[in-house]
Image: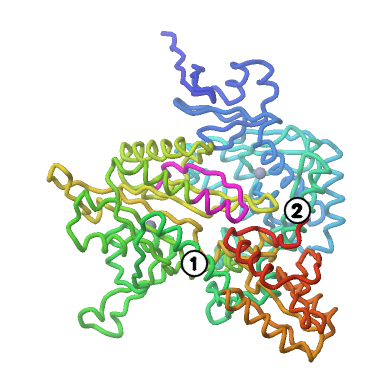
Amino acid sequence: MSQQESSVTVELPDGSTLDVPSGATVEDVAYEIGPGLGSDTVAGKLDGELVAKEEPVYDGAAVEIVTPSADEYLQVMRHSAAHVLAQAILREFPDAKLATGPPTEEGFYYDFDGIDVDEGDFDDLVAEMEAIVESDLDIEREEVSIDDARERVAGDPYKEEILEDLAAGDRGADDDIETVSFYGQGDFSDLCAGPHVASTGEIGAIDLREIAATNWRGDEDQPRLTRVYGTAFGSESDLEDYWERKEEAERRDHRRIGREMNLFSIPEHSPGCVHFHPDGMAIRRELEDYIRGKNDELGYEEVWTPELNKVDLWKTSGHYEHFCEEDEMFHWDQASARTEGDDADEYGLKPMNCANHVHLYQRERRSYRELPKRYCEFGTCYRNERSGELSGMLRVRGFTQDDGHAFVTREGIQSEVTRTLEVIDDVLADFGLDVTFKLETQPDDSFGDDALWERAEDDLRSSLDALGEGYEVEAGEGAFYGPKIAADAEDAIGREWTVGTVQLDFVQPDRFDLVYVGEDNEEHTPVMIHRALLGTFERFMAVMIEHFAGRFPLWLAPEQVRVLPLNEETLGYAHRVKNEFEADGFRATVADGDDTLQRKIRRAHDENVPYMCIVGPDEEETSTLSVRDRAEREARDVDPETFRDHLRAERAEKRLEPDFLDE
Ligand SMILES: [Zn+2]
Ligand SMILES: [Zn+2]
């Protein structure tokens, strides 16, 4: 009996489907579409996951073909560059053990055991890597049986472990794996799933970035490894641009500027938590006032809820399980010390405000006439991030969200989400940020049934369509309780930061048995919308410091005007001028030290003060000011009244740059 060849059906990016014989690879699919595409194929994507072109497709898979013109090509090339680094390292340290070497957002890294390098060795190492690139070695894939693979990796404990994981099917692969792949180039070969470019010569430009210490599997109890970071680009000029951007990012680093402008610090006694210094707090207060105004506009009622709660609160919401599993929550059981009643319960610091707001909703019987019911809070939360992950105000353990929750009817979702997106759009425009909305859909660890997810995602899509600004879809990136829209802001040097979010939640209302009485007098379950306009104040401030490079718009600047007296005699006039600014609610100071005027001007520039008023005997006699801005422009004989009128307007309109001296 002849065996009928079975086939699988795959979906192509244009939405059409294609039947291919079972066992067909990504490359076979490409050839099926067209011979030109087939020969250009470097790799593929199966349901969004980057795979080697030799990977068999499966029934129902969404297949994309990656060619040298695709965005993913850079990632593939960088993975090959990581292998070039490993090859160069082995030439220098033949006994080195290789761990893992993936591509990253900025390039690639490889983790090694048994090497002794520092950044002073980079020139030699890069020269070796460039020699490998220039030799244009073919990169060849080889399928090897598990047993043969065991022999090949024998003596390399990390590869042995990776291989055993693969053999056991622990890495999400099919259950019974018979072969694994190796990629080889010249004298180098690595156990690796790929994909890779065809030869080392396809790497346009390669460089090394830095060295860091790490541990195998990121686990402190495992052996110490040396991580070497590098990067690769299609051309030398792209690499040069990268280094320039990098330098610019370092110049703008919020930790450095925060120190120089005395805005904040992270105290040793509270790692991951922020001390806001008076000038940093001035910025935060402006942000808080601004967001309060926006919350009022959206109809939110401001509340405050406790940071310390019994963990039962999050057992109902499902957060407890989620956060404890990841060891991301600060919680403790007091039972050992006290054994009676409340004292014996397990407590935690809230990792989010949602469950507290749910309790506020539940205090009364709600009617459809009250919906949407909206609570907002500048809620301080704590998450137990690993100390190695902490970074200035960007990655913290204690943070305050500009949080808000709206409880709406199913019919009310779309208009609520649309209004919120409009406000987020306005808010980010006020900071001079371009926004890209991203729709993040159902992740693997989701709660709730698929039909609910689908409806929720449809609602968010409709709102994004209504906004009419276009959006991107990030499949599988939603939170575990609902799909989400993230507002990604592009800063002054083109970096993207997720700031605002709008998140639908069909799960919490169900778990907490939330209801409202509908027009039909029946009980219905409301839908919960989580949203933040800026995200957290810490992170947003860090992003703003870097975006403005410390040169804040007038309304945000911690010190808005500095009055510089020419000499001791004009000190009295200087203080009168300052007092008038303060009466208008401006943050103003007098530079009354002994420094020369030139030095005082220099310092005000260094500290990014938007405006300086220089006052000497001439100004005092004519009751005028000499005004200087941080762009080093100057005007004499300025009428103080006229100047203050301008400042009030500049502040109210949130203009991004001091513009009194324009024209
Ligand atoms: Zn690899
Ligand atoms: Zn929430």
Name above or below for residue 513 compared with residue 614: above
Q: CA distance from mark 1 to mark 2?
A: 31 Å
Q: Which residue position is annotated with label 2?
A: 245
- Choose top left, top right, bottom left or bottom right for residue 645: bottom right
* Pick the front one: 268 or 67: 268
Q: Where residue 622 sits: x, y (%)? A: 77, 79
Type of amino acid under label 1: Glu
Q: Where residue 231 sits: x, y (%)? A: 74, 49
The local crowd at label 1, few if under 14, some if 14 to 19, many if 20 or more residues have their Cα within 10 Å, is: some
* Pick the front one: 190 or 494: 494
* Image point (46%, 17%), residue name: 7
Residue 427 part of the magenta segment = yes
Question: Is disc 2 placed on a helix, strand or loop?
Answer: helix
Q: Where residue 288 sits: x, y (%)? A: 49, 67
Residue 64 part of the magenta segment = no
Quadrant that contains the N terminus? top left
